[in-house]
Image (cartoon, rainbow, N blue to C red):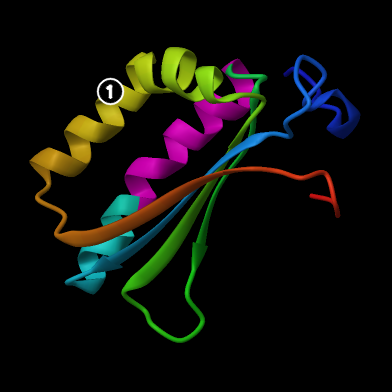
Amino acid sequence: MTKRKADEVGDETSKGAFVLLLTMQFEEEDHIKQFVKFFEPLAEYCKEHEPNTLSYEISLSDKDPLRLMLLERYRCKEDMIEVHQKSEPFALFKKQITEAGLKRKTEGHSYYETKAGYM
C-alpha cells in the first residue's frame, strides 16, 4: 500500500487537493444498504491501487436513514477523471448500481482545498 502525506498535496500546483462531495437521498433503505455493499470493494481497491485518491469515504446521516454523503479527495482533478473514473472496479461499481436499480437523488459539488485546516 502506498503511503500518502498531507504535505505532498498540491506540490504541483498552488491549489490544494481536488474534492468531490456528493449527497444521496435513497427511496428505500435496502437501496442504501446495497449501495454501501457495492462501494466497499471499490473503496478497498482505491486504497490499495490509487495512491492519488487521498480519501474515499461514505458517511451515513445521523438523522435520515435514507441519506448518505460520499467524500472523494484526489491529489488533482485529473487523478479523478483519468485514473479513478477509468478504472475497471469503478466501471463495475457503476454497472452494479445501475443493474440493481438503486433509486436515489444525487447532488454534488466539487472544490479545491485551501490548506486552511487539516484532514
Pick the quarter of the image with the N terminus: top right
Residue type at the position of mark 1: Ala
Q: Nearer the viewer, residue 88 or 40?
A: 88
Kindly report the secondary structure that dominates the magenta region of the rendered protein: helix
Residue farthest along the front direction in this orientation: 14
Is residue 75 located in the magenta-colored stretch of the structure? no
Is residue 40 located in the magenta-colored stretch of the structure? yes
Relative height, residue 55 to residue 51 (above, below) = below
- Classify 10 Å Cα crowding around label 1: few (below 14), some (14-19), many (20 and above): few
Residue 71 in picture, x, y percent from top left: 54, 50
Residue farthest along the bottom direction in this orientation: 63
Residue at 62% over, 21% down: 48
Please state if 55 lies on the left or on the right of 41 as rendered.
right
Residue at 72% over, 31% down: 15
Residue at 77% over, 14% down: 12
- Residue 5, located in which quarter of the rendered image? top right
Please state if 23 lies on the left or on the right of 112 as rendered.
left
Relative height, residue 77 to residue 33 (above, below) = above
Residue bounds of the magenta highlight = 36-49
Residue at 75% over, 20% down: 13
- Residue 107, located in which quarter of the rendered image? bottom left
Q: Nearer the viewer, residue 119 or 108?
A: 108
Q: How many marks?
A: 1
Residue 103 in picture, x, y percent from top left: 14, 59
Q: Nearer the viewer, residue 41 or 81?
A: 81
Q: Secondary structure at mark 1?
A: helix
Label 1 belongs to which residue? 91
Residue 109 in picture, x, y percent from top left: 44, 50
- Residue 40, located in which quarter of the rendered image? top left
